[in-house]
Image (cartoon, helix red, strand yellow):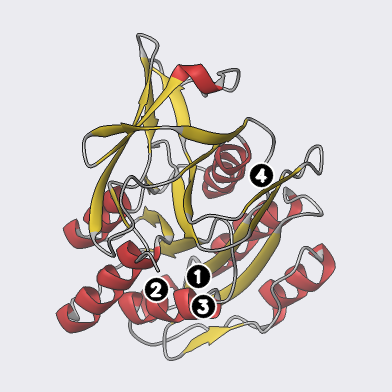
Amino acid sequence: MKPIAAAILVAGAMALVSARQSQVFRTNIDMVALYPLVSSSDGRLVTDLTRDDFTVLDNGRPAAISIFSSDRQPITAALMLDMSASMEDRWLRVRDAATRFVDAIDPADRIRVGSFGSEIALSPYLTADKTLLTRVLREELWPGGSTPLWNAIAAAMQSLTSESGRRTIVIVTDGIDTSSATQRIAMERAVKEMFMVYAVGFEGKGLSARLLDLIVQTGGGHFDLKKTEDLGAAFLRLADELRHQYLIGFTPASLDGQTHTLEVRVNRPGYSARAPRQFVAKQGK
């Protein structure tokens, strides 16, 4: 499993709420909010760092950190499940594993369930209601068809367009979609609008190089599971990592409307952080 992090550019007044202490951070300037996940060299999650343990580089130059929190951050995610024909003998396994993810969410979290195969379908509900989410998983998944993976990613992003904070797209699939035009459009949007992309690949052709590249660019993570591995455990690991991301806010040195390189460093030996590799600095007025 690769550690993950997410970032989103926040314009104007911004309120960032921690799910643990309900502490609200506000600012009246354009800034970038990052959600890095830190791990040690042995893969252990590191959750006790302070502001001084981090350095943020904007186009290679250190940026002043104006907001910091190690509190639990709410999850906002679209969970897209591959229901193509090749999944026919595994879709019950996927459904049951996704139910474990739903069981692990907190009241402050919001999840939307979707599937892709013969058609791409997304529930209208973005919610923490576990009863409702479980019903969607049991009654509204439609197996069959091909694997429109990149269209599913695009649809998931569209469904979260109006949401703020961390926006996570989780794809579960055993196949590869080779629609290059859709790939390019989806990749450009994910990077520009700073969606975090996760993928779980298993018992199939594996995750494509383009999807793995998108995961790296957006600060996401992925699993490659074999037939005997526990998909439910992968979902629980996903939930655990999303809960243990830090919150770091900084103001870009230049609000020039350009794409900036981004790096988050941990100022302790043996520790590393994963975060998106670029962001777009909103044009100053």
Report x, y in % for residue 65.
48, 33
Q: Tell us which disc is closer to us: 4 or 2.
A: 4
Mark 4 and 1 residues: CB-CB less than 8 Å, in contact?
no
Mark 2 and 1 residues: CB-CB less than 8 Å, in contact?
yes
Q: Answer with mark 2 or mark 1, whichever residue precedes in sequence.
A: 1
Q: How far apart are the two marked residues, 3 and 4, measured between alpha carbons?
A: 26 Å
In the picture, the quarter occupied by the C terminus is bottom left
Instruction: Name the amino acid type tagged 1.
Output: Met
Instruction: Name the amino acid type tagged 2.
Output: Ile
Q: How far apart are the two marked residues, 3 and 1, measured between alpha carbons?
A: 5 Å
**Which mark identifies residue 80?**
1
Instruction: Name the amino acid type tagged 3.
Output: Ser
Report x, y in % for residue 116.
45, 80
Instruction: Name the amino acid type tagged 4.
Output: Gln
Q: Tell us which disc is closer to us: 4 or 1.
A: 4
In the picture, the quarter occupied by the N terminus is top left
